[in-house]
Amino acid sequence: MKLLSKLLIAIGLSSFLSIALVAYADDAARDKEIAERFAKCDTNRDGKLTPEEAKGCMPRIYSNFNYIDATNKGYVTVAEIQAMANR
């Protein structure tokens, strides 16, 4: 009985770890895609995406710009977009 319990616990843990690794891989892939799109849209290459830069290039970012730019800086960074996407 103890062996069966340990086996079931091991199976459960391995399943949990597998799911966690897949989620991490998805986050990493999403972060990479965001960084690539951000780089294409950041036309002046200053590391900041303005609403004007986002408008035609990243429409979902443009439509949610004020929400992402919570401090009203007038721009968003790739890290802010990635953090929002990974919530």
Image (cartoon, rainbow, N blue to C red):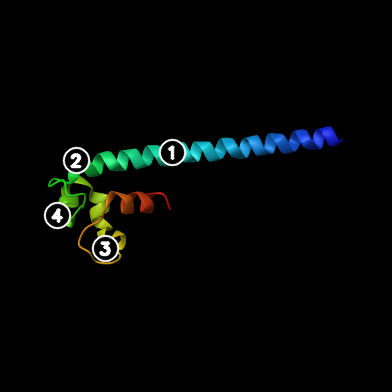
Q: Earlier in the sequence, mark 1 or mark 4?
A: 1
Upstream in the sequence, badge 3 or badge 1?
A: 1
- The reply to whether discs 3 and 1 touch (Cβ–Cβ < 8 Å) is no
Please tell me in which quadrant of the rendered image residue 73 appears: bottom left
Q: Earlier in the sequence, mark 1 or mark 2?
A: 1
Which residue extends farthest bottom?
A: 71
Nearer to us: label 4 or label 2? 2
Mark closest to the chain's N terminus, 4 or 3: 4
Mark 4: few/some/many CA within 10 Å (<14, 14-19, 20+): few
Mark carried by residue 66 = 3
Q: Quadrant of the N terminus?
A: top right
Q: Which secondary structure, mark 3? A: helix
Separation (CA) of disc 1 from disc 2: 21 Å
Query: Residue placed at 35% from the left, 49% from the top?
Result: 82
In the rendering, which numbered label is found on residue 40?
A: 2
Type of amino acid under label 4 = Glu
Left or right side of 45 for 28: right
**Residue 17 at what x, y percent from top left?**
59, 38
Count residues near mark 3 (Cα–Cα under 10 Å), then give few for <14, some for 14-19, many for 20+.
some
Q: Amino acid at mark 1?
A: Asp
Q: Is residue 76 above or below residue 5?
A: below
Q: Which mark is residue 10?
A: none
Q: Nearer the viewer, mark 2 or mark 3?
A: 2
Work out how far the residue at label 4 is from the one at label 3, CA to CA, in angstroms.
Answer: 13 Å
Q: Secondary structure at mark 4?
A: helix
- Tell me residue 3's x, y (percent): 83, 32
**Mark 2 vs 3, N-terminal side:** 2
Cα separation, mark 4 vs mark 2, equals: 13 Å
Alpha-carbon distance for marks 3 and 1?
Answer: 26 Å
Q: Position of residue 35 (x, y in %)?
A: 29, 42
Badge 4 vs badge 3, beta-carbon distance below 8 Å: no
Q: Which residue is denoted by mark 1 in the rendering?
A: 26
